[in-house]
Amino acid sequence: MDELVVPRRGFKLLSGGANRLLAEEIARSLGVELCKVTISRFADGEIFVRIDENVRGHDVFIVQPTNPPADNIVELLLLIDAARRASAARITCVMPYYGYSRQDRKDQPRVAIGAKLLANLITTAGADRVLGLDFHQHQLQGFFDIPVDHLYAAPVFVSHYRKKHLKDVVVVAPDVGSAKMARGFAKRLNGTFAIIDKRRPASNVSEVLNVVGEVDGRDCLIPDDMIDTAGTVTAAARALKDLGAHDIYVCATHPLLSGPAAERLSSAPIAEVTVTDTVAIANEHRFPKLVVLSVGDLLAKAVRNTHDDQSVSSLFELS
């Protein structure tokens, strides 16, 4: 009797409308075409999703960050559901930015834990695993009851700053939550470490109380996971400049750039603001100091290794 040969799973890469350019970059790096998908709206604004290719028995990867508007979340859930109902063998949610990740605890009476709710929705819709990039907090992985590969944009940033040949650089954590990230950058850039003591009197408002570390006459790098209204990084940059810092650089994985962010960053004593393309940046939010690096190749390698059942964490071990 002939031995039964189990066929290798096919591969399909899908994209929602939240960040089509990043999905196309991932597809180019993988040497594949994006799967054809129809996303349209009814007259009342309701979203309609249809996968226009056969995905039965395939390994399906859906690229969609979940930044506002909330329609991006609905698109993702509908794409997952469509793939599940089309009998995909495995569905991986490639979520470059995890929206609602700041709502990760009940720190006030009668508030929702939005990060957990979104994790439940993705799991219930039918996702088998999640690929995420620089979550706001590492413990968000525990909100999912499916495997999560938590990736890091650090290799992209480190490569960029190594080319600048910064001398005597100080990596400054803008708050306690960013301390581990800042220490990692300091180690890989052969720099020293400092931290800013701040408080938040209100949401999206920060006040710098003190800077712990030596910054006088040195280049400073302020890394963070996201820039929203830019209140934290601009306040930190001014505090560092007042203490005699030389050039100040800011990097963040997710450029939300809400409200006055672009104006604040443009007028702050910052030499360069470096972000990635996890979130699509509108033209009106771009400014001369802004440098956008692509994480398409990084995500493509993670997608390829996931499909081939190879290690993903090994891709992010920095030399």
Image (cartoon, grey):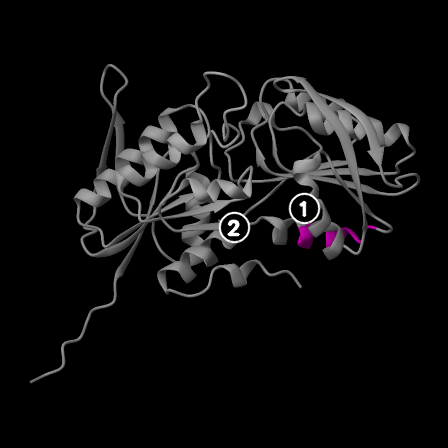
Q: At x 37% / y 30%, what residue is drawn?
A: 73
- Identified by mark 2, the residue type is Leu
- Asked whether residue 96 is in view, the answer is no
Total marks shown come to 2
Q: Is residue 241 left or right of residue 138?
A: right
Q: At x 41% / y 33%, what residue is drawn?
A: 116
Q: Which residue is mark 1?
A: 180
For this orientation, the residue located farthest to the front is: 109
Quarter assignment of residue 242: top right
Q: Is residue 204 left or right of residue 51?
A: right
Give the magenta-colored segment's residue range: 158-166
Q: Main secondary structure of the magenta part?
A: helix
Residue in front for this viewpoint, 181 or 292: 181
Q: Residues within 10 Å of mark 2 (few under 14, many from 20)?
A: some
**Closer to the camera: disc 1 or disc 2?**
1
User: x, y percentage for residue 293?
Assistant: 60, 45
Residue in front for this viewpoint, 33 or 14: 14
